[in-house]
Image (cartoon, rainbow, N blue to C red):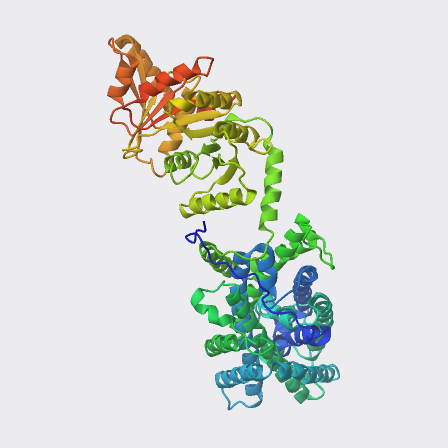
Amino acid sequence: MKNNIFKRNVPEAQEVVKSSSEGLGTFGGVFTPSILTILGVIMYLRFGWVVGNVGLIGTLLIVTIATSITFLTALSIASIATDQRVRTGGAYYMISRSLGIESGGAIGIPLYLAQAFSIALYTIGFAESVVGVFPELSIKVVGIVTTIAVALLALISAKAAIRAQYFIMFGIVLSLLSLIFGSPVEQSSIEMWGASPENSAGFWVVFAVFFPAVTGIMAGVNMSGDLKDPKESIPKGTFYAIGVGYVIYMVLPIILATRADALTLIEDPLIMRKISYWGDAILIGVWGATLSSAVGSIMGAPRVLQALARDKVLPRWLGWLGRGDGKDDTPRIGTIVTLGVALAAVYFGNLNLIAPILTMFFLTTYGVLNITAGIERLLESPSFRPEFKVHWAFSILGALGCVSVMFLINALATGIAFLFVIAIYVWLERRELQSAWGDVRRGIWMAITRAGLLHLGSSEEAKTWRPNPLVLTGAPTKRWHLIDFALSLTHNRGLMTIATVLTSKNILPEKIAQMEKSIRDFLASRSVQALVRVTSEPDAFKGAERLVKAYGLGALVPNTIILGDSEDLKIRKQYCKMIQNFHRLKRNIIIVHDDKEKGYGEKKTIDVWWGGLKGNGGLMMIAAYLLKTSRDWWDAEVRIKMVVDSEKAAEDAYRNVSGFIEKARTGATAEILVSEGRSFDEILHESSKDADLVFLGMAQPDENFEAYYEKMQERLKGLPTTMLILAAEEISFGDVLMQSQE
């Protein structure tokens, strides 16, 4: 029977965008948009500022560090891109398909914002250069008009925008040639370390402003859904763009440093125009580069938004952002929304403010991309077979580089960025999204589990002991009290297993799997973390014995069996035989004799009938302590009760028990009762009649265990819910209680 109660928000198992044999190639789809974004607004309007602030050597250092991070990230991107078909969403798609939808969303949302803000960066840069030529104009007005214009171009014809890139490339080449053949504007000496400290910004401040200049590799990745062959085009086009960009960025500082002094470079954003052979060529270059970069960003950002909506990362009421129009699946609605974000950034921002924000977002994305590739390679999953192989150490080095640079730039901003990403991750995790694709998280947990199992050893240690219960519940909904008790013992820390034995004949594996899922859903609905095991056996007792005997892996096996009491005389012999076999297997046993009317009562009083630390005493004390420290039993009083024959014996017993309680620090109280000719059963019923829970120890099973158990059940009549405790592990529970004092 299907249960819709536990149905979760599951993205459909479909490609984010359909494959197409008609797509862009390496040069037009990856290299061109990447190099045009690299050789953009920062190069034309802020490169002189960079050289002026940190000098020739400092600039070459910044370029090398920034490009190294980008190169290492490109290696990771190439590895992922040659393993899977990268669809719309670029970096988001890569991360979500590897680290899971929560991680992908936690990075995808900041990535979208970064790309939306990038539009503002480029249009503000364009506006600055225009106002530098026409001072009567307003930077804000020009920026807003330009932003709307590039958005309309992307909406009207994406192909036309892509074709325009080739003309822009020609303009950039022309501007660079004009710069090379230019002349100095003044006599100056080469400043190796920039202007004086009082007139210049710090190294890492300058780095933060420059870094967006090398983030152009995302332009090609973000257009992945429009590429004919992403596996081939993304690695090649990206590496070519990085190489060409690095060469240009290493040459330009030499030209700038030899043609103007540091203060001139800092104060004049259009200094390149003055030192070029044909100054207007610089305007052609900067206008073309900024506009093409803006077009590239406004084409890429909506596609990330589209992928987020289609994967249901965004709230359901924003699902309309996943729509696409035409055969190219153009995200027109997403483009309009992105335009709104960009306009807000243009209105409130400026170049030097936006650039560091972008740096933090891009470094975060780069870091996670590197982690993704590193984990995939480190795990060596059979499913990860990239054509471009990169050693995991390079990816991890790239990730460390990203994080280190972020902290060097601004530790506070880095912390805020991390908190922002974590907040999104937690939000997505609480929504319990499920993906229709696999990710590496299971592989990570498998690796951790393997390492843990191999290091656990074969013997239990008192210092690290905790109950790992196997709860024989049958139908969990009918025996919730067993799970409730086990949960209070483990505090959701121990490894708890909920087990059921099906006695019907010829049960298909599909039926067992369906029942296991139903139980898991039931537990999840009550926030219970537990493993689930369902097995089938015509004889329920033999099935339980077989399960307990075989269940577990290595040293990690259930050490405590929790089950309900049975008062059915017809099955008493089998029941007692099962208990004997559990004890023979060295499993501790807790039998729950529940009061069907009162249950656990008010959970205020726990009576432990104690006969000393040896035998069951230590386990009873530990169980009572764990119960008291659980959330539901927090206010409970644990009373350690002992029966003696005389007042003299009572004084000695009270002193000994109180001393033990003080050393064990369990928070219990001692209560010594004198028999005065009364039987133990009389004292038990009189003293514990108002308790919410009673602990009693059981004798070790022998050939007369069935008769013994019958007497125990007679003793239990009229008592509150009672736990029958039988310790069986080869471990001193006294050491578990007292080891901290040694």
Q: Nearer the viewer, residue 435 or 156?
A: 435
User: From where the camera sits, is residue 216 visible?
Assistant: no
Q: Residue 549's x, y, as percent?
A: 55, 28
In this picture, residue 534 sits left or right of residue 380: left
Q: Nearer the viewer, residue 482 or 133?
A: 482
Q: Residue 356's x, y, as percent?
A: 54, 68
Q: Is residue 624 shown above or below 496?
A: above
In this picture, residue 26 sits left or right of residue 131: right
**Picture quadrant where residue 201 is located:** bottom right
User: From where the camera sits, is residue 445 visible?
Assistant: yes
**Picture quadrant where residue 224 is located:** bottom right
Q: Residue 320's x, y, as percent?
A: 47, 71
Q: Is residue 597 shown above or below 509?
A: above
Q: Residue 100's x, y, as percent?
A: 56, 56
In this picture, residue 424 sits left or right of residue 553: left
Residue drawn 57% across the image and 84% down it:
156
In this picture, residue 382 sits left or right of residue 14: right
Numbered disc total = 0
Q: Nearer the viewer, residue 308 or 395?
A: 308
